[in-house]
Amino acid sequence: VESMSIHVRLQQNHSIEPFSGHYTTTFVDPESGKHHSASLCLFFTPDSSGNGYRIHGQGSDIDGSTVIECGFANYDGNAWWIEKNITGDISLQVLSRGMFNFRQRTFEGVWLANTMLSGPYLSFVAMEANPNQNYHSSPSPMASGGNIQNVPIVTGTAVSSPTTVAQSDHVPVTVVGSPV
């Protein structure tokens, strides 16, 4: 009976898909006490193991632009992801962990920086221009016809270098928008 109720609960939670798209957050800088806003574009794709969703995307806040290196959300909303700065302080990495409410399109949780600073998210909500639009089927908001503002566009130039970079130093980057 217990395993049957767990199975039913998983089926019910699985029927509410997470919202892929633009989220806004607010947090407090523990050193200054100042409130700051952040913008994230989160994308949820079903995990091949069938246990939830992989999280990827990008964001921007007072410290610079970020990419989500990896992340995961269970069907019940329990989630974590790691963001790495790609502008500003490029050594900064932040782990976010907490719980999504897929029905209300909110997240309650904390952030923990590799600088040893941490704190709660004061707010974390999905912002949607069209309430019927869910970017779940396509990881690119532009390909889906979404109107998402304040999403960093990453451009770069290949430069040859005699320095060999270790494989662990490579970071996958999601590029949003058309080529520049």
Image: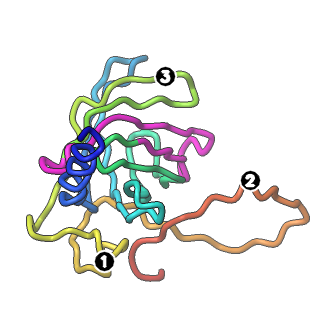
Residue 135: x and y, percent? 26, 70
Secondary structure of the residue carrying tag 3 is loop
Number of marks in picture:
3
Q: CA distance from mark 3 to mark 1?
A: 34 Å
Per the rendering, the mark at residue 114 is none
Left or right placement of residue 40 versus residue 106 in this view? right
Per the rendering, the mark at residue 117 is 3
Quarter of the rendering occupied by the N terminus: top left
Q: Residues within 10 Å of mark 1 (few under 14, many from 20)?
A: some
Secondary structure of the residue carrying tag 2 is helix
Please, what is the three-letter code of the amino acid marked with disc 1?
Met
Which residue does the image show at 46% across and 40% down from the upper left? 63
Which residue does the image show at 32% across and 26% down from the upper left? 120
Residue that protrudes farthest toward the right in the picture: 162
Q: Quadrant of residue 127?
A: bottom left
Per the rendering, the mark at residue 168 is 2
Name the front one of labels 1 and 2: 2
Say whether disc 3 or disc 1 marks the residue closer to the N-terminus.
3
| Circles 3, 2 touching at the beta carbon (< 8 Å) | no
Magenta residues, start to end:
80-105
Residue 67: x and y, percent? 49, 55
Residue 137: x and y, percent? 30, 75
Question: Residue 92 in magenta?
Answer: yes
Please, what is the three-letter code of the amino acid marked with disc 3?
Leu
Secondary structure of the residue carrying tag 1 is loop
Say whether disc 3 or disc 2 marks the residue closer to the N-terminus.
3
Q: On the image, numbered disc 1 is attached to which residue?
A: 142
Q: CA distance from mark 3 to mark 2?
A: 24 Å
Residue 162: x and y, percent? 91, 65
Please, what is the three-letter code of the amino acid marked with disc 2?
Ser
Residue that protrudes farthest toward the front in the picture: 1
Q: Nearer the viewer, residue 39 or 51?
A: 51
